[in-house]
Amino acid sequence: MTAGLWAYVAAWCLVSLGGLGLLWWGRGRFVITRTAYWRWLGRPWRLTTFAVGLVGIVVIAPYTGDPYWDYVDASLMATLAFVTAPWAVATLWRARRTGLGPEVVAAVIVWLFSASWSYDGWILLRDGAYPLTWRDNLIASSCLYAFAGVFWGLDGREGRMAWAPADAAWPQAVVGGFRAIWPLAGAIMLFIALLMLSSVLGWV
């Protein structure tokens, strides 16, 4: 590894530790640290779609032709996306009204760690070398992370589809069921499944 890459690793390690400290400092104030968020995230349809997606991405990991993609980083990044993306995307979306604050900074750090640095760190530990695709992964995984945040932020409300974080009371807001959002949710899951399958079959 070059000196520049070592400096980058040292920087993101320090930033990640700072993000962890921010989350500890903001416990009870940041949405992700509240019990209401975990109750909202734990609705059956979210857990079910996460389980389906996790199994799918872990099963195909060895067949994508990517030497850096394995069971560990596939399961780690998928889990981090499910747990943190709805909060991170919502926090950054709300920042247009709230402005830059500690929770926004924490959300950016968690986003970068979930979509990039966790992957980079695992490959560095596994292979003793930094992944050559780290820049490409940062871009591609960030797009998927944002997608996950929007997807799992959906809710059915009064028979209509809504994005839960748009409610000022979120995550304490009373939400409806899955019936109103299943057509869009199904289409999104089908699209992601075809995208993953295309990587295995060499369509992309």
Image (cartoon, grey):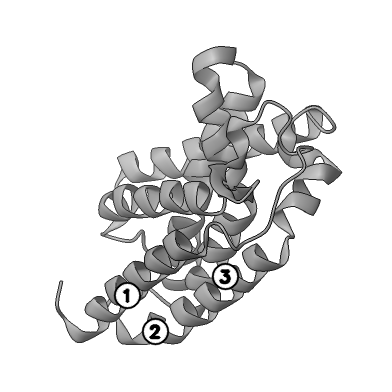
Q: What residue sits right under mark 2 in the picture?
A: 60
Mark earlier in primary sequence (3, 1): 3
Q: Secondary structure at mark 1?
A: helix
Mark earlier in primary sequence (2, 3): 3
As drawn, 184 above or below 17: below
Residue 181 in the image: x percent, y percent?
52, 58
Q: What residue sits right under mark 1 in the picture?
A: 196
- In the depicted view, which residue is nearer to us: 144 or 63? 144
Calculate the distance from the C-alpha at mark 2 to the C-alpha at mark 1: 8 Å
Calculate the distance from the C-alpha at mark 2 to the C-alpha at mark 3: 17 Å
Tell me where residue 91 sits by quadrant. Answer: top right
- In the depicted view, which residue is nearer to us: 113 or 121? 113
Query: Disc count in the image?
Result: 3
| Residue appearing at x 39%, y 54% in the figure | 144
Is residue 46 in view from this perspective? yes
Image depth: mark 2 or mark 1 in front: 1
Image depth: mark 3 or mark 1 in front: 3
Q: Residue furthest front?
A: 159
- In the depicted view, which residue is nearer to us: 32 or 15? 32
As drawn, 7 above or below 39: above
Q: Secondary structure at mark 3?
A: helix
Neighbor class of circle 3 (other Cα within 10 Å; few <14, some 14-19, many 20+) is some
Disc 3 marks a residue whose amino acid type is: Thr
Residue 186 in the image: x percent, y percent?
44, 69
Q: What residue sits right under mark 3 in the picture?
A: 49
Disc 1 marks a residue whose amino acid type is: Met
Neighbor class of circle 2 (other Cα within 10 Å; few <14, some 14-19, many 20+) is some
Residue 196 in the image: x percent, y percent?
32, 75
Q: Are marks 2 and 1 in contact (CB under 8 Å)?
A: yes
Quadrant where the N terminus is found in the figure: bottom left
Calculate the distance from the C-alpha at mark 3 to the C-alpha at mark 1: 15 Å
